[in-house]
Amino acid sequence: MQKPICILCAGSFEVEVILGKDAASPKKLGASAVAAKSKRQTQAERREATQAMVLESACRIFGEKGFADTSLKDIAEDLGLTITPIYHYFGNKQALFLAVTEAMELEFTQQIEEFSFSSEKIDLIEIWDMLIGMTQRPNFVRIVLRDAPIILGRERWEDTSVVQAVSRIFQDQLSLLYKSGSLTKPLSENDVVLLQRMLIGCFSEAALMLVANPDYDSRPLMLRVLALFGGVQSQ
């Protein structure tokens, strides 16, 4: 005959206690459960730490060697691990590369959004300066701009956090232009998409050119170009 079960609270979780002469005391079971919970949390923390270490190492090695010349063994040896935990957490090389790419895109997205929140009207030369800053990070350029479109497909680019952030900022700037009277004729949905793609494409290609020519000072030219379109606030 099954003995009745009593549900006791041990901290923030429940412990089932089998009532009976030989059953362990609720106090003893509660302490065991707390210890088990603590152990689980420690394992979760270790798992998160390992995943972060793998991402950091993969970011550096993918950036240095490129996707094609990087193996999971390279990353495992860099960390002093076997390949097993990398497969366990990320599945395979392409899945790990996707995780690295998304992490770098998210970091860039946060910079864009922090910049856009600092002022209502965006000074385009400051956007350009931020882009130049990103080109000084070769890992970002090689992973996000060079390898990711080839390995992960260009079609995913539209759904990335970077493009979504740029789209929101672009829409906000259009609204400001409408309100100020600078833009009187409404743009169609296709007009907006085309302009966004042109903008993002230009910045992406410009970033690759700047990486290939690190000594070139592009700012004077950009000041002249943006001034033609009224895209530079008073300096």
Image: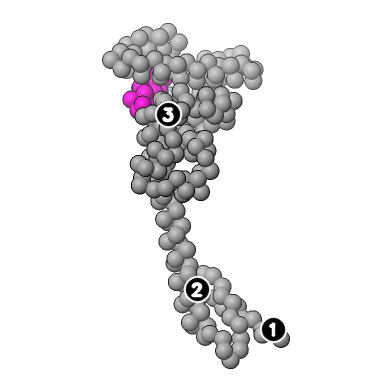
Q: Residue furthest left?
A: 215
The secondary element bearing badge 1 is classed as: loop
Q: Residue furthest bottom?
A: 21
Cα separation, mark 2 vs mark 1, equals 22 Å
Instruction: Read off the residue under disc 1.
Output: 2
Give the foreground label among 2 and 3: 3
- N-term mark: 1 or 3: 1
- N-term mark: 2 or 3: 2
Give the answer, above or below, for where 212 lies relative to 157. Answer: above
Q: Which residue corresponds to the image point at 48% horizontal and 82% vertical from the top-left?
A: 28
Q: Is residue 106 magenta?
A: no
Give the answer, above or below, for where 115 lies relative to 125. Answer: below
The rendered magenta stretch, by its main secondary structure, is classed as helix
Report whether residue 115 is seen. no
User: Which is nearer the eye, 93 or 35?
Assistant: 93
User: Which is nearer the eye, 118 or 162?
Assistant: 162
Instruction: Read off the residue under disc 2.
Output: 33
Instruction: Read off the residue under disc 3.
Output: 69
Give x and y (percent) for residue 125. 38, 19
Which residue range is magenta in the image?
124-138
Give x and y (percent) for residue 25. 52, 85
Tag 2: amino acid: Ala
